[in-house]
Amino acid sequence: MRIAVAGGTGAVGRRVVAALVASGHDAFALTRSSGHDLTATDAQPALVSALAGCAATIDVTSVATTSSATSTRFFGAVTGNLLAAERAAGVPHHIILSIVGAVEAPAAYYAGKKLQEDLVMASSGGWSILRATQFHEFAAQMVEQGRMGPVQVVPTMRSQPVAAADVAEVLVEIALGEPRGLDRDLGGPQEENMADMVRRYLAATGQKRPVLEVPLPGPWGHALRDGTLLPGATARRASQTFADWLAAL
Ligand SMILES: NC(=O)c1ccc[n+]([C@@H]2O[C@H](COP(=O)([O-])OP(=O)(O)OC[C@H]3O[C@@H](n4cnc5c(N)ncnc54)[C@H](OP(=O)(O)O)[C@@H]3O)[C@@H](O)[C@H]2O)c1
């Protein structure tokens, strides 16, 4: 099967491409580094030809921001471009990876995720939405993005993290089947505290930096710490713990 992976070089995207290729599929990444800026107003012609013959597109693009304006601009443009190009190229299945709790707290980065979900749900073709919790790899992303001088700043945040590899496996399973609409949520095996995850990640990678846990103000900050991001009772639970993931680094 020919499958396009928008964001196919990212934390989850590269695992999706690798898993598809390993099982004999013709999977390829659509990213700026492969010549496709999916936010560009002139992205269409090249996208339509890249998507020719695809059975599905998996969108795992992302933008590093806490601004709701930046996030909605990014996910609005990427989703609009992909859906229009898929219509023109006859791609029957659009898959996105959303976040457990994002729709309940549509502020900051999550405002863009809510818009992305809304656009996909309103689209005329087949679609699937998988909502997952934070990846174990999110601790590393926090370290990259949350450094303030000598200190590592982390918002107070409850999470039940899941390995990006486990998320990739479910995305592949979805892409190889019929559109599911809104699928069951996916989370990891146990709840963690994000500041603690970052401390353990820093220690495991030999980095010495104090971690400052900060409760963020406003509805978004509240949602991060009040359990909104935790998976419900009906969610699928992947088996790899954060400790297992750290041990395998
Ligand atoms: N990280 C988490 O904990 C987590 C949890 C649940 C759901 N999610 C969702 O999963 C998705 C992937 O997250 P991630 O953490 O794997 O992302 P990531 O590692 O930040 O990777 C982002 C990908 O998007 C591509 N990209 C960025 N801007 C682009 C543009 N203008 N045009 C084309 N491609 C672009 C990047 O490639 P280039 O830079 O080469 O363009 C890269 O391949 C996101 O939608 C996120 O909301 C993430």
Image (tube, rainbow, N blue to C red):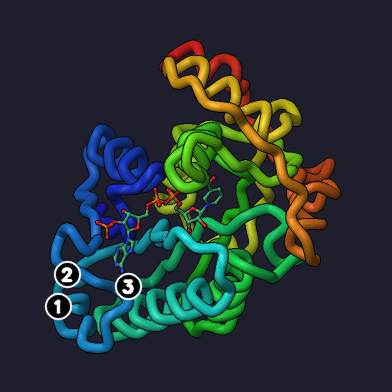
Q: Which residue is mark 2?
A: 50
Which of the pair 98/28 is nearer the observer? 98
* Foreground: disc 3 or disc 2: 2
The residue positioned farthest toward the top in the image shown = 247
Note whether 39 is above or below 95 in the view shown.
below
Report the side of 48 relative to 125 (left or right).
left
Note whether 79 is above or below 236 in the view shown.
below
Number of callouts: 3
Query: Could you say which quadrant of the image residue 222 lies in?
Result: bottom right
Query: Could you say which quadrant of the image residue 223 lies in?
Result: bottom right
Residue drawn where x is 58% and y is 74% of the image:
68
Q: Position of residue 209 (x, y in %)?
A: 52, 26
Quadrant location, the C terminus? top left
The residue positioned farthest toward the front in the image shown = 149
Query: Could you say which quadrant of the image residue 248 lies in?
Result: top left
The yes-or-no answer for disc 1 within 8 Å of ligand 1 is: no
Sequence-wise, the earlier of marks 3 and 2 is 2
Residue drawn where x is 24% and y is 55% of the image:
29
Per the model, the C-alpha gap separating discs 1 and 3 is: 15 Å
> What kind of residue is marked 3?
Val
The yes-or-no answer for disc 2 within 8 Å of ligand 1 is: no
Q: Which residue is mark 1?
A: 46
Q: Are marks 2 and 1 in contact (CB under 8 Å)?
A: yes
* Foreground: disc 1 or disc 3: 1
Q: Secondary structure at mark 1?
A: helix
Report the side of 228 relative to 41 (left or right).
right
Which label is found at residue 3? none
Note whether 204 is above or below 185 in the view shown.
above
Residue drawn where x is 41% and y is 83% of the image:
80
Decide if residue 152 is in sight here: yes
Q: Which residue is mark 3?
A: 91
The yes-or-no answer for disc 3 within 8 Å of ligand 1 is: no
